């Protein structure tokens, strides 16, 4: 009986201690999050070190804490300009600016900055984005004329005009372009300790689209590799390599494929009522948090843009044109540092291709229009860049590409002007059919880009290697 009583006392003590430790750990984690949200990154980091000691057995909490600290470091990289450095760049782009001018631009939210450890730090692209915003809001007509005269825009207009001509009767892929790509990722010297294995996922073309085919892998830098199945949301080719001291670690692949353009003439589309009971309809009209969402702002804007009784085509067109008048393209923060991208776009009234696409998809899905993410690269010879767009589903017609961030074209022909509302050019690389999906093989640590996959992903057993630890390069031959 005495032994039983002692056992009960010990058990009670252990339980009380465990509860107290859990409470202390949760309180400490809350303090870390509060400090991080307020921009006190150094203090948050010190508290995180303490949490790892005090809460050594709480692996899940430590992992959450590590994620906060890693995001803080990513924010530091995005906001690296001092006020003096920012002002210097503004002067370079716009000439001397007065304090009152800067105050007005700041009030308009045209200048992006954060308080980090008590210092006002500016977004790396704050000055160049300021120029874009001034042009959009103050000199839109001049900007449109300059864009129309750009050789790349002239070539795009001619190319999309040819696509329209060849799809007058039916929306089928036309004007195929054959491309051979060599893609390289180079990890910086000593990014990981000598001898450690570096794991690398590289973007690879999907084959389940009528607009993209004839995919052929030509070479890989490593003999052993894993090619993700085409059914994967993110199509990747995975390789490993051991790090060598003071030496860059390079991964390279080469492949070729064919990409075609497509256009759906809105006047010839066979639009029928949606089968709202279908699994596909429910999937592509649902939220996918955090960035495809039906927040109060999303619902309000979508209802303001459209009218009761609008058919699907009208809803899509009204929403598309709303962007052209309200959401200019600007350089973006890394997506991992924005908790809710559509809300960020609404608040700041700007965004890059993916940010605009997340908001576009949220607005359309809320209105009952099925829409899915698509992304990879835009590859016209005059402007090669990673890029995001989407596809809209019309019952009776199928999936139709829609590129929200490609601007209205300089044409008197309204359909050619609005080509990218329901069309796409031939210079694309499709890598992704969705967002935030698992990799094959599985990635262990927080991704550098948690939603999309265009540049690649790299890690080792010690953690993720962020974009500042490696470079990427794409070389293209048009055949």
Image (cartoon, rainbow, N blue to C red):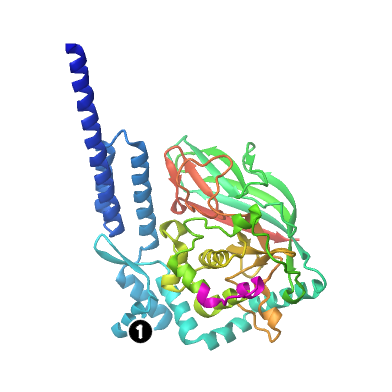
Choose between 407 and 295: the one closer to the eye.
Answer: 295
Choose between 317 and 156: the one closer to the eye.
Answer: 317
Q: Which residues are magenta?
A: 303-316
Horizontal arrangement in the rendering, residue 387 relative to residue 192 (left or right): right
Choose between 390 and 306: the one closer to the eye.
Answer: 306
| Residue 333 vertical position relative to residue 64 in the rendered view, above or below | below
Horizontal arrangement in the rendering, residue 417 relative to residue 469 (left or right): right
According to the picture, the residue beneath numbered tag 1 turns out to be 96
Task: Identify the residue at horizontal 44%, vertical 69% (top origin).
Answer: 297
Crowding near the residue tagged with mark 1, few <14, some 14–19, many ≥20 C-alpha atoms within 10 Å = few
Horizontal arrangement in the rendering, residue 321 relative to residue 213 (left or right): left
313 in magenta = yes
137 in magenta = no
Where residue 446 sits in the image (x, y, percent)?
A: 45, 46
Where residue 412 sits in the image (x, y, percent)?
A: 69, 87
- Assign a secondary structure to mark 1: loop
Where residue 196 sits in the image (x, y, percent)?
A: 47, 35
Choose between 230 and 18: the one closer to the eye.
Answer: 18
Horizontal arrangement in the rendering, residue 99 relative to residue 402 (left or right): left
Location of the N terminus by quadrant is top left
Asked whether residue 331 is in view, the answer is: no
Location of the C terminus by quadrant is bottom right
């Amino acid at each position: 009986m005495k032994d039983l009583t002692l056992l009960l006392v010990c058990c009670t003590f252990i339980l009380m201690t465990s509860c107290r430790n859990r409470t202390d750990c949760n309180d400490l984690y809350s303090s870390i999050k509060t400090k991080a949200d307020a921009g006190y990154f150094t203090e948050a980091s010190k508290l995180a070190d303490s949490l790892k000691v005090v809460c050594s057995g709480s692996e899940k909490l430590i992992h959450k804490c590590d994620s906060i600290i890693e995001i803080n470091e990513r924010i530091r990289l995005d906001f690296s300009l001092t006020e003096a450095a920012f002002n210097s760049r503004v002067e370079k782009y716009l000439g001397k600016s007065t304090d009152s001018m800067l105050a007005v631009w700041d009030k308009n939210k045209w200048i992006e900055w954060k308080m980090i450890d008590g210092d006002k730090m500016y977004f790396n692209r704050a000055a160049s984005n300021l120029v874009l915003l001034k042009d959009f809001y103050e000199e839109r007509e001049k900007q449109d004329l300059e864009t129309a005269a750009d050789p790349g825009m002239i070539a795009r207009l001619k190319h999309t005009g040819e696509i329209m001509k060849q799809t007058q009767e039916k929306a089928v892929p036309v004007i195929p372009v054959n491309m051979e790509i060599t893609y390289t990722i180079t990890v910086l010297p000593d990014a990981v300790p000598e001898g450690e294995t570096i794991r690398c996922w590289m973007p690879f073309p999907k084959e389940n689209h009528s607009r993209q085919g004839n995919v052929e892998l030509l070479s890989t830098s490593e003999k052993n590799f894993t090619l993700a199945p085409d059914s994967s949301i993110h199509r990747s080719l995975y390789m490993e390599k051991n790090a060598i001291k003071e030496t860059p670690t390079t991964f390279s692949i080469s492949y070729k494929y064919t990409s075609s353009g497509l256009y759906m003439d809105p006047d010839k589309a066979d639009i029928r009522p949606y089968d709202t009971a279908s699994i596909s309809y429910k999937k592509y009209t649902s939220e996918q948090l955090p960035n495809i969402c039906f927040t109060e702002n999303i619902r309000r804007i979508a209802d303001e843009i459209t009218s009761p009784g609008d058919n699907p085509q009208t809803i899509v067109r009204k929403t598309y044109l709303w962007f052209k008048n309200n959401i200019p393209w600007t350089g973006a923060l890394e997506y991992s540092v924005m908790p809710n991208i559509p809300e960020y776009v609404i608040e700041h009234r700007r965004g890059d291709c993916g940010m605009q696409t997340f908001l576009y998809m949220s607005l359309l899905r809320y209105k009952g229009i099925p829409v899915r993410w698509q992304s990879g690269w835009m590859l016209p010879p005059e402007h090669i860049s990673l890029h995001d767009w989407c596809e809209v589903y019309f019952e009776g017609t199928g999936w139709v590409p829609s590129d929200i961030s490609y601007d209205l074209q300089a044409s008197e022909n309204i359909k050619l002007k609005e080509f990218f509302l329901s069309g796409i050019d031939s210079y694309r690389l499709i890598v992704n059919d969705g967002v935030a999906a698992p990799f094959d093989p599985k990635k262990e640590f927080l991704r550098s880009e948690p939603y999309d996959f265009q540049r690649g992903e790299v890690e080792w057993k010690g953690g993720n290697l962020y974009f500042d630890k490696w470079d990427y390069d794409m070389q293209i031959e048009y055949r």
